[in-house]
Amino acid sequence: MPRLSALWRQGHDLDGTCRGAVSALSRQRLGADEVNASLRRAVLERDGCCVLLKLDPSHFCRTVWGEYHDPRDLDKLTIEHVHVTGSMMGKRAPDTLGTMVAMCGYANVAVPSRAVRDAIRDYLRGVAA
């Protein structure tokens, strides 16, 4: 019997049923959503910390795995895209300084609430002025 990792790569679950192998198109899309490195750095430097800490001083930053970290550790922060004009379900905002904020990975993966997004929109309007 092949090793488990070999089965996974071939597109089979542990019981041997096929779950569909990753297509070449899927592999290309894995890195397609990355933000340009210089634009990412500009957002992180503008915000200086997780934007949620600015909105709520009692906020604790965590990685996507739930490990606590310093909210000013820019290397551990992620980029969140927010439509300035309002909700656009399923559509990512463009990669611009006016639509992106620095956010801890845990909050980003948990999907910010409408109230948080509204507060972020107010924050973005304030830094743009």
Image (cartoon, grey):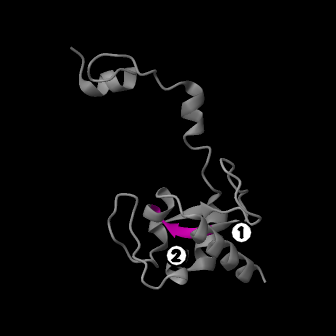
Count up the numbered dots.
Answer: 2
* Marks 1/2: CA–CA distance: 17 Å
The crowd level at tag 2 (other Cα within 10 Å; few <14, some 14-19, many 20+) is many
Name the foreground residue: 63 vs 31. 63
Q: On screen, 17 above or below 48?
A: above
Instruction: Give me the residue at 44% from left, 77% from top.
Output: 71
Residue carrying label 1: 97
Where is the N terminus found, in terms of image quarters?
Answer: top left
Magenta-span inclusion, residue 100: no
Residue 47: x and y in percent read 60, 78
- Element marked by disc 1: loop
Residue 23: x and y in percent read 54, 24
Residue carrying label 2: 52
Residue 42: x and y in percent read 65, 71
Where is the C terminus found, in terms of image quarters?
Answer: bottom right
**Would residue 7 appear left or right of 91 to someone viewing this image?**
left
Q: On screen, 6 above or below 114?
A: above
The residues colored magenta run 101-105
The crowd level at tag 1 (other Cα within 10 Å; few <14, some 14-19, many 20+) is some
Q: Where on the picture, by quarter, is residue 81?
A: bottom right
